[in-house]
Amino acid sequence: MTGAVEAGVLGGALPLIPFVAALVGFLLPRASRRAAGLLGTAGAAAALAIAVVLAIRVDGLVEASQVWARLGALPVTATVRLDPAAAYVAVAVGVVALAVQLYSIAYLRGDDRYGPYAAQVSLFTAAMLLVVVAGDLIMLLVGWEVMGICSYLLIGHDRSLPEAPAAAVKAFLVTRVGDVGFLLAIAILGVRAGSFRFADVLAPGVLDATTVTVVCLLLLAGVAGKSAQFPLHTWLPDAMAGPTPISALIHAATMVAAGIYVVARLYPLFLASATAMAVLAVVAAVTMLLGALAATAQDDIKRVLAWSTVSQIAYMAGALSIGASAAALFHLLTHAAFKALLFLAAGSVIHAVGTNLMSRMGGLRRSMPVTFWSMTIGLGALIGVPPLAGFWSKEEILHAASGAAGWPAALVYNAGLATVFITAAYATRLWLRTFFGTARSSAAEHGHEPGPVMGVPVLVLAGLSAVVGFAGLSSAFARALGGEDPFTVGADALVPLAWAALGIVAVWLIWRRSPAEDPQWVLGPLRPLFANAFYLDNVQDALVVRPTVALARAVRRGDESGVDGLVEGTGRATVGLGAAVAALHRASLPRAASAVLGGAVILGALAAVAVAGGWL
Amino acid sequence: MIHPVLPYVIAALLFGLGVYGVLVRRNAVLVLMAVELMLNAVNIVLVTADATVRAAVPQTGAVFALFVIVLAAAEVGVGLAIVLQLYRLRQSVQVDEVSLADDAVVSADAGSRGADEVEGQLVR
Amino acid sequence: MTTADVLIVALGAVAVAAGAAVVTTRHVVRAGLWLVVSLGAVAGLYLTLAAELVAWVQVLIYVGAVVVLLLFAVMLTRAPIGASEDLDRVRWPGAVIGAGAGLGLAALLAYAYGWSTVELTEQSGAEAVGSAIFTAWVLPFEVLSVLLLAALVGAIVVSRPDIGRRP
């Protein structure tokens, strides 16, 4: 049992060490790639080591707190709140961060901005770990926002890509929309509870029912933005413009899972509001299906994986909405492993073939066997093939959904089953298109395995994806995540398995008919609809982007002609007045003489009248 | 023995005529002639004042009248020099055509050449 | 009405009539000549008022120099020799102001002096005026000489554009 002091020190060091690595990394000169790589990797490794120590030593809830500021009457504390779940999530973050740092050394070999990149990844790691250990809402907010900034910087890393800056801005702005709700929720919580500490906010009886519902709904807005759930999901597929290791770290394993994690941390609040849970269930069900359907019609391999992420996060959200937070956290951990694996392996493929598009790949099974098997394990985990990791966690979620009462649970269960089928379909499609058949471009014919610096992280993650699921069988693990029983599987596991098998077989048969064609032709007229994700991007553009831009233009016009006009108008009026008076002065000579003499006569007459009248 | 009101009224009428001439005449030389009328009116008043006002210094009025005559001569000299220069530049001495705006810049060389022609013709 | 009064009225009438002719005639040269008549009448007026020095200086300088200068200018600016129609601007503002000034002053002076009389003495004779100039008014006299010099130089500078030009 760790004491509060030890928890405080270790928990505080966890985000602090990568942060220091990031600061030093920003100050390094551009040319010192070695130093930057070493620093990044060392930072991630140190964070992983501390996380492992914490995972071993923490076995209950422990908090260490310190007041460091006051917002009026409200104290802001630096609080570290650790429980085994937080420690496991920290380990997952550490593993993926370390894998990505190592992988990036080789992936970005030709990039001359590698130094700032590595420092930004360290900064991101620090922010994510801050979110993991934070026990105070303001600390959480700081980590949350820094993650957003790092995401923006890293998506826009490759300046030569024309779509990268736009994608970075889109990611930032869409998540900002959600963050408004998040910030409001934190403000309301802080004011109503009188403090920002989790312990104070989650204490029973502090908040009344309406406040809880309002707060939960606002928090869900932030969660939807950060975790790319409907309707704020539009940024994630476009964020694939960033480098592939970043997609693995931020947009698969860690940042998008942060929303789920926050809900799990504040779970007592959510349990108290049935409305928020129902809303979450609906959002989860819609997003699950939306993501999976969109993934079936993409040509870019990274976009398939991005939509897959949207769909899998929705699984976690669905689990949370029916009260199974342990299952959600379990799936978060397994998803971190296999999604990072999928992205890094896809990165190896892209690195070898030189393009993201599956229509230019094919037949890579023979030239890249290690990558092929790693990806197979990853896709198997995604579909939920036993005994890989994804099977256990997905089963647990569906088991909880089938066992719980109420329409949200039924909704989540049915949507989950349908999604299992579609997930199997698109995963099989990706597998077949990339690795089987004949090579469809000259680059695909000359595919090669990447070097060990890229290969080893992939292999480690493949091993983890295969094995991590078994941890669920241990009751200590289950209790640590907050569940009661170990994650066993019963007979009801056969239903999802059947659906998955159906999906795999169906796509395989379609592919067999004409191996050179993309199996998505079977979608027929629905294909463009799925490929454009139900045109939700366009809806967002019309409803939000265009009015905002129009408003911005109107405000600018008002400022330029109104406010500036007022100031400049004053100047111009004065100048004009001066010119008018000057023109008066430039009267012709006779007119001036008339004015002078006429004025003298009038004044004389007035004087005479005044004297005669006795006034002077 | 005189009634001083008579020269005074005469002076006043002459002054009024001079004002009329300054305001109405377009030729600069005619304006200067009207100015001379006004100066003369003032001189009449000064000289008459010698008799009607008991001044500390007895002949002040006449002395000032002499000074006014000298000043008038000087003024006419300089004024006519200006009028002639204006004529060289503009070929006309109409006072209501004198523009006081900034864009009235004319080369003086052209003007002096024109004046030499005039003088040459007059000599011939 | 004494004899002096009658002379004053007569000479004044001539002066005023000639002055009216100066400002209304349509011949430029005739305006100059009418000015001679008017100035001569005023000189006579000075004689009647027992200011001989002023009268003779008037004839010498005004009639002899100033009017000649004006006539020179008339010729050098090629003023039209015969009658010309466009010598005048709009008349009524000038008429109003001129009438206002002249008649206003006349009324004022008539009101001030009424029909009072005053004695003419020899106080404005040549000897008296001369001694006054060279005792009480010598400083202004000298300053006037300087002013005449300045006017002389100025007239030359104004009329010769090559003087004073910077290279």
Image (spheres, grey):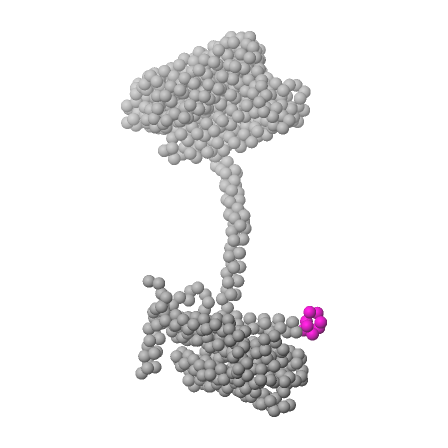
Q: Residue at x 66, y 81 (%)?
A: C113
- The x, y position of residue C167, in whole percent, is 33, 62
Quadrant of the rendered structure where residue B51 is?
A: bottom right
Up-down relation of residue A68 to residue A161 (above or below): above
Residue A489 in view in this figure = no
Principal secondary structure, stretch drawn in magenta: helix
Bounds of the magenta segment: A609-616
Quadrant of the rendered structure where residue A204 is?
A: top right
- Along the horizontal axis of the image, is B15 left or right of C70? right
- Along the horizontal axis of the image, is A491 left or right of A108? right
Q: Residue A613 in magenta?
A: yes
Q: Residue at x 50, y 32 (%)?
A: A174
Quarter the C terminus of chain A occupies: bottom right
Quadrant of the rendered structure where residue A613 is?
A: bottom right
- The x, y position of residue A113, in whole percent, is 37, 28
Q: Nearer the viewer, residue A102 or C91?
A: C91
Q: Nearer the viewer, residue A356 or A366?
A: A356
- The x, y position of residue A579, in whole percent, is 50, 60
Q: Residue A487 in magenta?
A: no
Q: Residue at x 34, y 78 (%)?
A: B119
- The x, y position of residue A491, in whole percent, is 52, 11
